[in-house]
Image (cartoon, grey):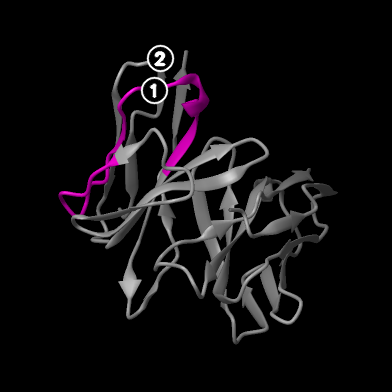
């Protein structure tokens, strides 16, 4: 089954304790992206990757890191989490066709609470 | 930045009625997409309309696009309780760096049985 898998789905942790949220897709998609969703602010892009070893900042990259060593995986790293990073996080991927990208497939989300 | 503005923010209707949601945006686009999000789940793509199209249908969904007014509407006909979800428009901006979508803040639809 074609899917984007995020882990963990839920995490409660404390300020400053490094954490990684994994994202894996099985559709051989070139494009992957991380979003955070907050009430009243909608979805905001954190980082994205157009292919292996190609990553770039989205609209709200501060406090986050990513890597894209393999096509299928795009982990999101919070080196020193802070309470303002408490949010619902989504990973998404899409296929490139010609010069454009197809609609995005989303994971089921990771709800992070930073105390 | 959030380009899409959706209207209304919340909509409550009875089963069998039609639901209409609107989206406005600010820049030139390649296409506009609509997504649905069930509570606690990821977004699911519903329909894509290209900038040179004016109307598109998919099952009970009808999407219109007016590029002169920079607006789109999503119509769900004969709604069902299972249509209860949040609906987001997202634009693929002609100036973006490949793949980026800009999402609106969504319309929360409640369909009462």
The earlier-in-sequence mark between 1 and 2 is: 2
User: Which quadrant of the structure image shows residue A62?
Assistant: top left
Q: Are marks 1 and 2 in contact (CB under 8 Å)?
A: yes
Q: Is residue B98 above or below residue B110?
A: below
Along the viewing direction, whichever of B1 and A108 lies nearer the viewer: B1
Q: Is residue B50 left or right of residue A32?
A: right
Along the viewing direction, whichever of B78 and A14 lies nearer the viewer: A14
Q: Is residue B21 left or right of residue A62?
A: right
**Can you tell which mark lies on residue A15?**
2
Q: Position of residue A70 (x, y in %)?
A: 16, 51
Chain letter of mark 1 equals A
At numbered mark 2, what does the secondary structure look like: helix, strand or loop?
Answer: loop
Q: Which residue appears farthest toward the left when viewing the image?
A: A69
Q: Position of residue A67 (x, y in %)?
A: 23, 45
Chain letter of mark 2 equals A
Query: Marks 1/2: CA distance?
Result: 5 Å
User: Which quadrant of the structure image shows residue B17?
Assistant: bottom right
Along the viewing direction, whichever of A6 and B16 lies nearer the viewer: A6
Residue that appears at 69% across and 80% down: B67
Asked whether B57 falls inside the magenta stretch, the response is no
Q: Which residue corresponds to mark 1?
A: A81
At numbered mark 1, what does the secondary structure look like: helix, strand or loop?
Answer: loop
Residue that appears at 27% across and 40% down: A75
Residue that appears at 54% across and 39% down: A37
User: Which quadrant of the structure image shows residue A79?
Assistant: top left
Give, as a single range, the part of the protein colored magenta: A66-90
Q: Is residue A66 left or right of residue B106?
A: left
């Amino acid at each position: 089954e074609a899917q984007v898998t995020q882990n963990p789905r839920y995490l409660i942790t404390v300020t400053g304790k490094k954490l990684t949220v994994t994202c894996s897709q099985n559709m051989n998609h070139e494009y992957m992206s991380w979003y955070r969703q907050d009430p009243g602010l909608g979805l905001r892009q954190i980082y994205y990757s157009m292919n292996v070893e190609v990553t770039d900042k989205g609209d709200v990259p501060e406090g986050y890191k990513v890597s894209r060593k393999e096509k299928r995986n795009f982990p999101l790293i919070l080196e020193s989490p802070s309470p303002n990073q408490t949010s619902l996080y989504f990973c998404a991927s899409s296929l490139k066709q010609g010069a454009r990208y197809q609609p995005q497939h989303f994971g089921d989300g990771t709800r992070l609470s930073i105390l | 930045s959030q380009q899409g503005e959706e209207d209304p923010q919340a909509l409550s209707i009875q089963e069998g009625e039609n639901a209409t949601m609107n989206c406005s945006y600010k820049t030139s686009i390649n296409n506009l997409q609509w997504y649905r999000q069930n509570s606690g789940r990821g977004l699911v793509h519903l329909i894509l309309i290209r900038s040179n199209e004016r109307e598109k249908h998919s099952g009970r969904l009808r999407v219109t696009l007016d590029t002169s007014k920079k607006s789109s509407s999503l119509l769900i006909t004969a709604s069902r309780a299972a249509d209860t979800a949040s609906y987001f428009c997202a634009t693929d901006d002609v100036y973006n760096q490949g793949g980026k979508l800009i999402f609106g803040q969504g319309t929360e639809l409640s369909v009462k049985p």
